[in-house]
């Protein structure tokens, strides 16, 4: 599985959510009036006081992330960070029937192994932002990226 380079990762933080969502059509995900075959949510969790860090901050390996929308406790997708802290949550069209990226977040439960963040318990949460929509042989593929993580106490 390929992960973006750390320099690309910091570019991703500047991406602004420019897509709007539309109602579901025949059970498919629609985003900016396109039928989505797949949605990828990329990002990185760094071992820093707030989970964001910079290019020289080590990533958090083995952190379990979940993707949820509309404040729901239901997880639409899950991923584990690689050795450098990068992750990729993949949703197929059937996985995210009510997917609205403007109301979705990536969540990491605390504490993290071998890394201190503040507060030590709770959740790190990040909104997701649209990076691009590309055609594929099975339909459109949307790539979204996580923004800055914020601590949410429990």
Image (spheres, grey):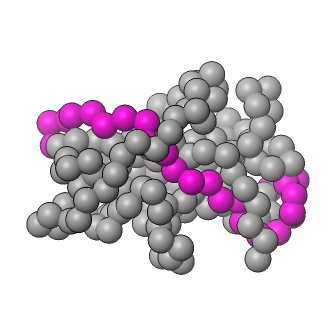
Q: Residue at x 76, y 60 (%)?
A: 151
Between residue 114 and residue 130, name the one nearer to us.
130
Q: Can residue 82 be seen by looking at this rendering?
A: no
Q: Residue furthest left?
A: 26
Q: Is residue 56 above or below residue 29?
A: above
Quadrant hosting residue 18: top left
Q: Residue at x 57, y 42 (%)?
A: 43
Name the spot of residue 52 as percent of width and height, x first: 74, 43
Is 88 placed left or right of 35 in the picture?
A: right
Which quadrant is home to the N terminus? top left
Residue 56 located left or right of residue 76: right
Look at 87% across and 63% down and name the residue there: 119
Q: Quadrant of residue 77?
A: bottom left
Numbered range of the magenta stretch: 113-138
Q: Is residue 96 at least partly visible in the picture?
A: yes
Q: Is residue 125 magenta?
A: yes
Which quadrant, please, contains the C terminus? bottom right
- Residue shown at 67% from the left, 35% from the top: 84
Residue 83 lies, in percent from the top left, at 67, 39
* Numbered marks: total: 0
**Is 16 on the left-hand or right-hand side of 27?**
right
Measured as percent of width and height from the top left, residue 17 is found at: 46, 44
Q: Position of residue 13 (x, y in %)?
A: 60, 36
Residue 88 forms part of the magenta stretch: no
Instruction: Name above or below for residue 113 compared with residue 54.
Output: below
């Amino acid at each position: 599985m390929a992960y973006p380079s750390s320099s690309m990762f910091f570019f991703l933080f500047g991406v602004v959510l420019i897509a709007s969502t539309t109602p579901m059509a025949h059970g498919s995900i629609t985003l900016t009036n396109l039928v989505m075959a797949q949605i990828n949510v990329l990002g990185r969790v760094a071992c820093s006081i707030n989970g964001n860090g910079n290019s020289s901050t080590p990533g958090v390996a083995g952190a379990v992330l979940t993707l949820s929308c509309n404040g729901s406790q239901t997880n639409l997708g899950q991923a584990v960070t690689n050795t450098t802290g990068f992750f990729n949550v993949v949703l197929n069209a059937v996985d995210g029937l009510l997917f609205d990226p403007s109301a979705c977040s990536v969540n990491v439960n605390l504490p993290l192994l071998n890394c201190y963040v503040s507060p030590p318990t709770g959740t790190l949460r990040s909104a997701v932002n649209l990076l691009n929509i590309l055609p594929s042989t099975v339909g459109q593929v949307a790539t979204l990226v996580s923004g800055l993580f914020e601590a949410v106490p429990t």
